[in-house]
Image: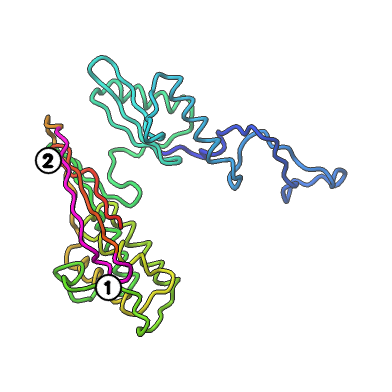
């Protein structure tokens, strides 16, 4: 669901004054300013004011706010529950009980102006496929848009995200490249690591050189894009299961970074058979 004009629902606690808006000036009081009673778009307090409003509303209706993720809310009713996830004015929710689902929908629509978006298929660049077996998440659309943006649609498909013998360093002998362009590519690829753990190590390795990138570092990015060209539709699957055992794996290299001789640690965690988190840190 989507909240219409969400920020206008917030109430600000500070005194804020604004100039008279074009078209609403009072010639007799031209030196006067307006005192805001409600939050407006463009006001730095508006996002926080909206969150406080929504959070207070949910907790007053017996939802429990997450201790780690403060945008996650949960409500239980006997053996059933409903989970609500908030991202600014976008809200996704799921429930084990149809009545809880309908109750929450009515609760929100009675309080705010809402648009019901139907079954979740796309959220923050993630494509979601739901079935009786479980849920699959992928970023195929974003991947193809990225290949098109950097003119890599016709690139030669590559089997691995980085050559096994590759090592990255400052490489002072290589030519400089535009840092803004490099950082833009880096940001796009980092966003893909939301679901693509297979490129996480390589992208994070390239991130170390974003201040003064070289041609050799840009070539690694193009290598990663060639790999994405070959496997653009990789999915993460979350299967229906009663197995809630938590299993973690970790690994590390030994001073792979020839520049600073620092090691990189990597890890991933499975809940049942489902991959739920991964990391790659130096």
| Horizontal side of residue 179 vs 223, given as left or right | right
User: Alpha carbon of mark 2 to alpha carbon of mark 1: how far?
Assistant: 32 Å
Indicate whether 166 appears above or below 247.
below
Residue nearest the viewer, comparing 156 with 182: 182
Colour theme: rainbow
Q: Are marks 2 and 1 in contact (CB under 8 Å)?
A: no
Pointer 1: residues within 10 angstroms few (<14), some, or many (20+)?
A: many
Pointer 2: residues within 10 angstroms few (<14), some, or many (20+)?
A: some
- The disc label shown at residue 21, or none: none
- Which range of residues does the magenta coloring cover? 245-261
| Horizontal side of residue 244 vs 125, given as left or right | left
Residue nearest the viewer, comparing 99 with 273: 273
Q: Considering the numbered disc 2 on the image, is that residue within a helix, a strand or a loop?
A: loop
Q: Which residue is mark 1?
A: 220
Q: Residue 134: horizontal and vertical position, in percent? A: 15, 39
Write down the quadrant of residue 148 in the picture: bottom left
Which residue is at a point 23% across and 66% down the rendered structure image?
256
| Horizontal side of residue 119 vs 208, given as left or right | left
Q: Residue furthest right?
A: 28
Q: Is residue 110 magenta?
A: no
Q: Residue 106: horizontal and vertical position, in percent? A: 39, 24
Mark 2 vs 1, N-terminal side: 1
Which residue is at a point 73% across and 37% down the rendered structure image?
35
Q: Residue furthest top?
A: 78
Q: Residue 87: horizontal and vertical position, in percent? A: 41, 41
Write down the quadrant of residue 186 in the picture: bottom left
Q: Residue 129: horizontal and vertical position, in percent? A: 21, 45
Indicate whether 233 appears above or below 133.
below
């Amino acid at each position: 669901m989507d909240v219409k004009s969400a920020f206008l629902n917030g109430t600000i606690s500070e005194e804020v004054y604004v100039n008279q808006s074009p078209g609403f000036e009072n010639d007799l009081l031209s030196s006067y300013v307006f005192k805001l009673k409600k939050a407006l778009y463009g006001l730095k307090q508006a996002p926080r004011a909206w969150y406080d409003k929504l959070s207070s509303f949910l907790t007053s209706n017996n939802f429990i706010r997450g201790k780690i993720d403060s945008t996650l809310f949960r409500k239980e009713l006997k053996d059933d529950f409903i989970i609500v996830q908030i991202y600014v004015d976008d809200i996704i929710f799921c429930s084990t009980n149809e009545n809880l689902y309908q109750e929450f929908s009515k609760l929100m629509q009675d309080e705010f102006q809402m648009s019901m978006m139907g079954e979740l298929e796309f959220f923050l660049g993630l494509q979601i496929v739901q079935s009786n077996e479980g849920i699959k998440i992928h970023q195929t659309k974003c991947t193809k848009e990225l290949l098109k943006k950097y003119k890599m649609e016709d690139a030669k498909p590559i089997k691995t995200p980085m050559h096994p013998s590759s090592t990255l360093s400052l490489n002072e002998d290589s030519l400089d490249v535009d840092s803004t362009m490099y950082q833009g590519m880096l940001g796009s690829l980092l966003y893909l690591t939301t679901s693509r753990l297979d490129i996480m190590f390589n992208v994070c390795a390239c991130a170390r050189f974003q201040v003064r990138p070289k041609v050799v570092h840009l070539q690694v990015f193009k290598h990663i894009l060639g790999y994405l060209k070959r496997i653009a539709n990789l999915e993460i699957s979350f299967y229906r299961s009663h197995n809630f055992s938590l299993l973690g794996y970790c690994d590390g290299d030994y001073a792979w970074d020839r520049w600073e001789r620092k090691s990189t640690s990597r890890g991933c965690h499975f809940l049942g058979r489902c991959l739920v988190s991964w990391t790659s840190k130096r």
